[in-house]
Amino acid sequence: MISTPIRRLSRAQKMILSWYSINGRQGLPWRTTRDPYRVLVSELMLQQTQVSRVIPKYAAFIADFPTIQSLADAERTAVLRRWQGLGYNNRAVRLHALAKLVRDEYGGRIPRDYEGLRKLPGIGPYTAGAIMGFAYDSPAPCVDVNIQRVIARIGWDAKRGVSHDEIAEAALRLVTASRSPHEWHSALMDFGSTVCTAKNPGCASCGLRGICASKGARGDENDASAPQSRFSGSVRWHRGQVLRALLQGPKTVQELQSIKSADKELLQEAIAAMERERLIKLRGMRVILRNDG
């Protein structure tokens, strides 16, 4: 059942790698390192954040916290201050907690095997696979939305559909057959984000149109890259405003309510959520950033 898609994908693999050698984004800062800590930082930053926004933030973060030890030893407020502007600040809290765990229980060394990585809190299958491939150049399953889309489209007719298990099996076969998992995953990601895009894929100019099972098919109507909900004035926006204010020092609830353009109800919702996530604590009417977990 899977032999024909695999043969098709094996042919496509050589063509995608050739395309990547000319068109790939080899200069991205996290692609020039084999440090698992720096790969981890980049992967967490790239979750739900565009590459163009991550590049300067990644450089500044690594300048302040060049090693997992330096991050573990830092105050949480310093980590949040450097993360500011990327959004979804609980990512920074999780990263900081993970750094302290690796320092205290792993001797400051991130595991070198997939199973060991998966045991770390907050490290899912994709992130573990990304560290294995990008840091250790070792074959492991690593399937993000771009990789999933490219493999599914090339291997299977869009009308037939394909299961997650079939894609995972194909992805593992391909990375195992590659000369460099680092290069192969980079190529797939770039090809998926620039040519085989979710909406309006460039089929007419694609070098794979002769073998792609889904050539000419419409883009994915329900792809994860669909426009996101409005940010300005949202709870997430209010969370960012609260964090920005508290990084300057403790504030009263009344002071936070005076934030320009803040909605009192949404602000309270943001404060409650941040307290539940142990980002902040309330002392009477004063709101304080937590430095502990």
Image: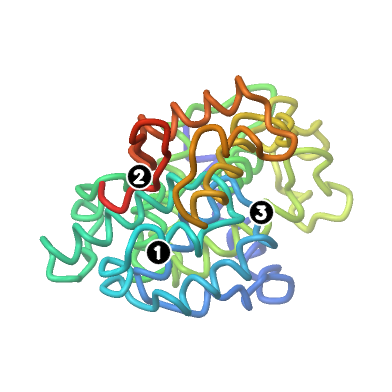
Seen from the viewer's position, the closer of residues 50 and 75 is 75
Q: Is residue 249 above or below residue 152?
A: below
Give the mark nearest the N terminus, 1 or 3: 3
Q: Is residue 31 above or below residue 188?
A: below
Q: Secondary structure at mark 2?
A: helix
Of all residues, the one furthest to the top in this rendering is 265
Q: Nearer the viewer, residue 33 or 100?
A: 100
What amino acid type should be assigned to the residue bearing mark 3?
A: Gln
Task: Residue 137: name its quadrant.
Answer: bottom left
Under mark 1, the amino acid is Gly
Give the residue displayed 51% in from the left and 79% down from the top: 32
Determine the CA span between mark 1 and mark 2.
Answer: 12 Å
Mark with earlier residue (1, 2): 2
Residue that carries the numbered disc 2 in the rendered image: 125
Of callouts 3 and 2, the N-terminal one: 3
Residue 98, image x, y percentages: 27, 55
Residue count near mark 1 (Cα–Cα under 10 Å), binned few <14, some 14–19, many ≥20: many
Q: Which residue is mark 1?
A: 133
Is residue 35 positioned above or below 261 on the image? Answer: below
Q: Which mark is residue 69?
A: none
**Going by the image, does 3 lie left or right of 111?**
right
Residue closer to the observer: 101 or 259: 259
Q: Identify residue type, mark 2.
A: Pro
Residue occupying image coordinates x 46% and y 44%: 170
Label 2 Cα crowd, 10 Å radius (few <14 / some 14-19 / many 20+)? some
Q: Which residue is mark 3?
A: 50
In the rendered structure, are the residues bearing label 1 and label 3 in contact, judged by CB atoms less than 8 Å apart?
no
